[in-house]
Image (spheres, coloured by chain):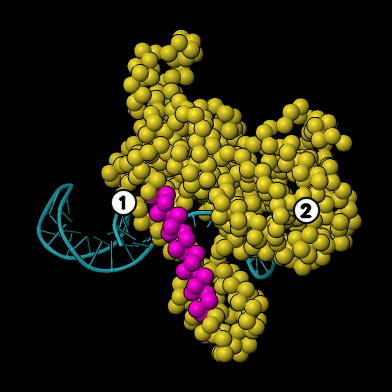
Chain colours: A yellow, B cyan
Amino acid sequence: MDSKILLQKKLGFTDFKPGQREIVEDVGKKRDVVALLPTGGGKSLCYQLSGYLLEGPVLIVSPLLSLMEDQVQQMKSMGEKSVIAINSFLSFQEKEKLLHADFSRYKFIFISPEMLQVKRWLSKLQALPIGLFVVDEAHCVSQWGHDFRTDYLKLGDVRDKLGKPPCLALTATATDSVLLDIKKYLHLERAFEHIYSIDRPNIAYKVEHIGSNREKRERLHDLVKLFRGPGIIYFSSRTKAEQICQYLEEQGVERIAFYHAGLPQEQRILIQQQFLLGQLDVICCTSAFGMGINKSDVRYVIHYHQPTQLESYVQEIGRAGRDGGKSIAVLLKSDEDIMLPQLIIDQELPDHIFVSTVLTEMVSRWNEVKSLTDEMLTDLELRFPASETHWRYLAYQLSTFTAKNGPLSVMNLELCVSFLQKQIQARTSAKQEKLRFFHNWTLEADCRRRGILAYFGEVPGSPIRNCCDYCGIVMEEYSIHEEKRKSITGDAPSWKQLLAKLLVQED
DNA sequence: CGACCTGCAGGTAGCTGCAGGTCGGTGCGCTACT
């Protein structure tokens, strides 16, 4: 069936967004595809429609449970009943039942990379003629795979074990090196690329250099009062997100809440829902908030702290203006908290002393070690306290090492320690480089948009109005008062606007 | 590493100054507990 007729019949859309048709048609020809579509570009439609064009079930690897549940709900409400998500939301009984059920009745199967490492589920899936292997938010392979969620790096092996079905990798932010990682770790030797510009012309970029943290707090308050909402404020610290939220509340800001991964699940869902439904205007949050938030009318994103890399920044500000409406992103930068991103990078991976002590201990205890088993881990964890992430990283790197050099023993202990040290060093310095680039971007006396686009290997198109603080932004246009004024006087520009246009100045 | 908080001494009312401690992001699945 023609993809356009299918689009109308199955999903009720009359037209494709840019790129969607090309992607769907390539996937329909059983090609491997890497697709980079800007946020709000309609990525889920790509795999849904491709799924209907291909025989066999579609396996969708998704990074977040909430994202999976959302997609399942959405598809079910569209009338697609043969959808299931395999994750920890299922009860023990449900999982048992499912393991013995006939899977062929499911057309769309959502799963996490972690679940794909569980043998029972993998062999269940291996029995199916998977028609398409989808990796949603594929930048996670590169962004999380190397340390935080190493199961992302094993997806290529999983795909091989499933008979190497065609693969569709979807993302909204990918530099060349991220694209390389995606292709490497998903085993995409000859992928067709559909790369669309990450530029979001309706978002103005602004960096403000602030002297001290007290000033920053006050400036934030001014901006929140000034801007038309809803808006998101990003922090790199949970306590700061809470404190500043409280401060803003005390200053009279209403319909505001904080959000971070330390909150109980129910509360997180509640706040997300309230924000989506328009019951909250401002969210003070960490990077936990955002992925999978389908709110189209976010008008501003303010960063109280800068992330560690420009990729994350672009992702986070990309949550503004998905409806195409005028939006603004402001980064508040003070020299006082320059250490924070540096520290986050340093803590991400285990240090050299930890690695060498633990590996030495392992050899002396078990002589020959093929991999870090759960029993060993419970034993070691007690005496060598470290985060779960550090242990998983160690386990992953150890398995990489032993696959090449045989089991860990006295013979190759030194080699293994230096192997790990090199891995850690390479990863850390790559991250430091990214941080340095981001830092320089904030200091640059040049168009912000050009800088971002250059980082992603793009060149800017024709100049746009309200581009960035370098090219000029009429701040008034983002103000809540502007909206009120418009509704009274119509669209005629004010003398201030006219003057501002003539002078092209900011503030 | 450094901002920020807490506790304490000094000496009698609310403050200063200093030492010492704490904190600094992202998620999955699982198990044991309520």
Q: Which residue is mark 2?
A: A166
Q: Which residue type carries mark 2?
A: Pro
Image position of B27 with respect to A219: above or below: below
Q: What range is drawn magenta here?
A: A417-439
As drawn, A119 above or below A332: below
Q: Quadrant of residue A410?
A: bottom right
Of A260 and A448, nearer the camera is A448
Q: What chain does badge 1 belong to?
A: A
User: Is A141 positioned to the left or the right of A358 in the image?
Assistant: right
Q: Is residue A84 visible?
A: no
Q: Would you name the residue on which mark 1 appears?
A: A336
- What residue is drawn where x is 46% and y is 29%? A463
**Is A349 drawn above or below residue A481 in the view shown?**
below
Q: Residue at x 34, y 36 (%)?
A: A219
In the image, taking residue B20 as reference, residue A179 lies left or right, namely right
Q: Label 1 crowding class (10 Å Cα cut-off): few <14, some 14-19, many 20+?
A: few
Say which of A51 and A448 sits in front. A448
Question: From this viewpoint, is residue A125 visible?
Answer: yes
Q: CA distance from mark 2 to mark 1?
A: 49 Å
What's the residue at 60%, 44% (across, down)? A172
* Residue A362 counted in the magenta span: no
> Residue A126 appears in which quarter of the rendering?
bottom right
Q: Position of residue A239 (x, y in %)?
A: 42, 51
For label 2, the SS is loop
- Considering the whole magenta stretch, tell me its main secondary structure: helix
Residue A31: percent from left, percent from top? 77, 49
Q: What secondary structure is marked by label 1? A: helix
